[in-house]
């Protein structure tokens, strides 16, 4: 009887080692170890043996059972591992696939204006500024009023604004400059503030060699204690040298903007000794600070703004700014 069980157990170990699925493992266990199994039957019949033989027979029976149990556990482990491997193989992504070498690879590149914008951001971030953004569709409050340009102000007409007809009550427009971002930033946080805001701006200009109706500006704003015109001049100088090269100089010329007082235009030097106008700047007008809930007795600021497309035109000596929007890849792929 014991031998019969040992033989069945040895066969079961082999069958378990070869079992192809978990169902087969459970079947073999039931047959060898379960309540109606060969093992249960043999155990019941131990009682028929001579008491002297019983202990030895019981030990052999338990040994055989333990071997079957261990073989079943090993089979389960083996099947689970194989199952994992199958799943991994099925879910595997081949990221090494290459296009056949016969297909010429054409790499994209950034638009020259985007490249100029990225470099400008890098230069100012290097000076401790962060980058801010505002919406391209603005209300008259942000585009004009908060910037100290009330609706009777003659400066309004100089912006050639493109209005958006949404009806009453608000006057809505495509922003004519990036200066509204100054207001949004100062409304949203307490000084000190050091930001630049690059973005698209719009005016009802007819496109020609030096104008686009949709163009890009970058705005700068610094608000802190004891800020002076000297800080503005130094910042512009530092930026110009970092962007164009150490040999390029900058200068400020008195000018007028409603949102700064005093105001200036800034120029950069050209190799032939002439000066080229780049943008406007000045000390933030006290009314503008007050419009944003900032006390002009405690805080001062400077601001500046200029065209990014113009800058790219100058840098690459392009003679028609419209090339930037013609989407001719023969032109664009040169940069
Ligand atoms: N927003 C002005 C424009 O588009 C440019 C400008 C001038 C921005 C002076 C400034 C500034 O921040 O201080 O014509």
Image (cartoon, rainbow, N blue to C red):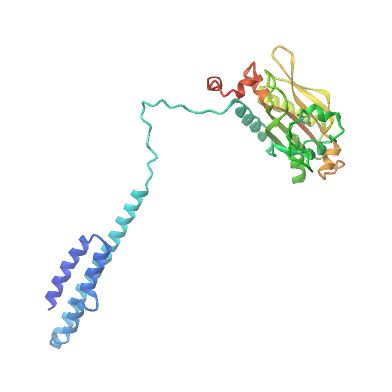
Residue 117, horizontal then vertical, whole percent? 64, 30
Task: Indicate the quadrant containing the N terminus: top left, top right, bottom left or bottom right.
Answer: bottom left
Quarter in which the C terminus is drawn: top right
Foreground residue, 187 or 245?
187
Instruction: Compare residues 251 and 329 and report the one nearer the observer.
Output: 329
- The answer, for residue 192, to whether it is visible in the render is no
**Residue 237 visible in the snapshot:** yes
The image shows residue 22, relative to residue 323, as above or below, that is below
Residue at the front extreme, as displayed: 167
Residue drawn at the location 18% of the way across and 67% of the way down: 12
At 38% across and 33% down in the image, what residue appears?
Answer: 98
Which image quadrant is residue 39 in? bottom left
Quadrant in the picture for residue 126: top right
Q: Residue furthest top?
A: 272
Quadrant of res 20:
bottom left
Residue 238 position within the rendered picture, expressed as x and y whole percent measured from the top left = 71, 27
Residue at coordinates 15% horizontally, 73% vertically from top-left? 6
Which quadrant does ligand 1 occupy? top right
Residue 43 position within the rendered picture, expressed as x and y whole percent measured from the top left: 19, 81
Q: As displayed, is residue 80 above or below residue 111? A: below
| Above or below: residue 86 compared with residue 150 | below
Residue shown at 20% from the left, 60% from the top: 18
- Viewer-nearest residue: 99 or 129: 99
Q: How many marks?
A: 0
In the figure, is residue 109 to the left or right of 216?
Answer: left
């Amino acid at each position: 009887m014991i031998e019969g069980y040992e033989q069945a157990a040895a066969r079961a170990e082999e069958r378990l080692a070869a079992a192809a699925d978990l169902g087969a493992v459970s079947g073999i266990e039931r047959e060898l170890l379960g309540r109606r199994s060969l093992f249960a039957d043999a155990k019941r019949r131990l009682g028929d043996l001579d008491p002297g033989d019983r202990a030895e027979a019981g030990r052999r029976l338990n040994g055989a059972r333990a071997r079957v149990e261990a073989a079943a556990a090993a089979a389960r482990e083996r099947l689970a591992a194989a199952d994992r491997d199958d799943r991994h193989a099925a879910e595997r992504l081949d990221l090494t696939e290459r296009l056949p070498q016969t297909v010429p690879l054409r790499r994209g590149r950034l638009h020259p204006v985007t490249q100029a914008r990225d470099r400008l951001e890098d230069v100012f971030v290097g000076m401790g500024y962060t980058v801010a953004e505002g919406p391209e569709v603005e209300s008259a409050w942000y585009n004009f009023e908060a910037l100290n340009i009330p609706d009777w102000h003659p400066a309004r007409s100089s912006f050639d604004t493109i209005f958006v007809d949404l009806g009453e009550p608000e006057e809505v427009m495509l922003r004519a400059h990036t200066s509204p971002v100054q207001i949004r930033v100062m409304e949203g946080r307490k000084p000190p503030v050091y930001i630049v805001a690059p973005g698209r701006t719009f005016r009802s200009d007819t496109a020609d060699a030096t104008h686009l109706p949709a163009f890009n500006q970058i705005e700068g704003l610094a608000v802190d204690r004891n800020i002076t015109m000297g800080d503005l001049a130094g910042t512009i100088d530092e930026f110009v040298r970092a962007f164009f090269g150490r040999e390029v100089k900058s200068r400020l010329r008195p000018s007028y903007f409603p949102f700064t007082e005093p105001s200036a235009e800034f120029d950069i030097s050209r190799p032939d000794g002439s000066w080229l106008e780049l943008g406007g700047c000045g000390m933030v007008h006290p009314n503008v600070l007050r419009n944003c809930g900032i006390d002009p007795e405690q805080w001062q600021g400077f601001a500046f703004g200029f065209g990014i497309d113009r800058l790219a035109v100058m840098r690459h000596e392009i003679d028609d700014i419209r090339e930037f929007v013609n989407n001719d890849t023969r032109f664009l792929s040169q940069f």
